[in-house]
Image (tube, grey):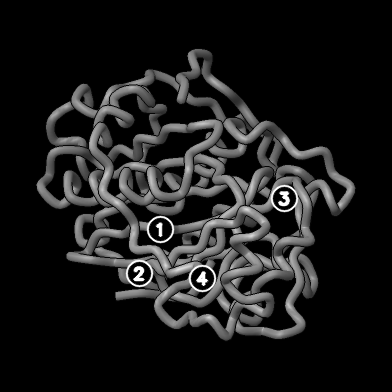
Amino acid sequence: MSTENGTGTHGNPRSLRREDGTAHRMSNRMTLRAAPRGWGAAVLLWAYWPRLDYASGLALQHRLHAARGRGEIPDVLLVTEHPATVTLGRRGSLADLPLGPSALAARGIALYQVGRGGRATFHGPGQLVAYPIVDLRALQIGPRRFVEALERAAVQVLRASGIEAEGGIPVPGVWVENRKIAAIGVEILGGITRHGLSLNLAGELGPFDFVVQCGIADSHATSVDALGVSPPRPIEVGAALANELGTVLGLHPREADATSLLQETRQPRRGRSVSLG
């Protein structure tokens, strides 16, 4: 089921201030295999890469999704950034690309057709992408509540930086007035999620106009930086998202060892790419 849109390791725990002034803190970094038995439905492991090309990120999602389905790992949140990439969800088409595929290719922008919900989305440097691999059956929640959980987590993280945002208006995602600051696009197979949330921290906003966001012709993007707020470091935002999502879903966030996650993709599967010719 689908719903509307959207290497290195780090040692010390990170913290962010919540709206109520309390601190988010991460502790007890784990490898995937080190997660205690029986904690599969209670732990949310998360890991951050500074940059991951889209094909590798897609392959990693597929492998983690399969491993979660087999019960080999607990729920996972993968946090990263991508080079300039446009993705088309299940309802997307080339009509959502005003410049056309060839013009995107000439600008060095990759193009993929993927299984998430929604239409066209741009990913690029300065945007944090969060991919939750979560078993909704174990949590006993449905797709709508999961999307609302992603929206709520993003809204809370933005509020911690002093930005008032809203989720679900006019379509799933997170908005500051009439500008989109976070896109949500989820795919659910066998009760387990993949794809997820992209949150604009900084970077150029011009490329967002290369796509018709959410099928809304006059929809425009914004970012934390564009709103005059100095964005926190991506890994700090990843930690905060893991904390907020864990709070909403009743999961305990733990930072995972990124190397163990990377080993899951020694032979990555290729994503299904739209022809750029």
- Looking at the image, tell me whether mark 4 or mark 2 is earlier in sequence order: 4
In terms of sequence position, does the residue under pointer 4 or pointer 1 come before the other? 4
Image position of 150 with respect to 38: above or below: below
* Residue with the mark numbered 1: 195
Which quadrant would residue 205 be assigned to in this image? bottom right
> Given the image, on which type of amino acid does mark 3 rest?
Arg
Q: Distance between the residues labelled 4 and 2?
A: 11 Å
Which of the two labelled residues, at mark 2 and mark 3, occupies the earlier sequence position? 2
| Residue 276 drawn at (x, y percent) | 50, 67
Residue indicated by mark 4: 5
SS at badge 4 = loop
- In the current view of this chain or complex, which residue is farthest to the right? 228
Q: Residue furthest left?
A: 70
Amino acid found under the numbered disc labelled 4:
Asn
Q: Nearer the viewer, residue 249 or 221?
A: 221
N-terminal of the two: label 3 or label 4?
4
Q: Are marks 2 and 1 in contact (CB under 8 Å)?
A: yes
Q: How far across and how far down the image is residue 270, in percent?
A: 30, 52
What numbered label is drawn on residue 115? 2
Q: Where is mark 3, residue-wise?
A: 159
At x 48% / y 80%, what residue is drawn?
92
For disc 2, the neighbor class at 10 Å (few under 14, some 14 to 19, many from 20) is: many
Identified at 45% across, 46% down, the residue is 247
Q: Which of 133 and 264 is in front in this view?
A: 264
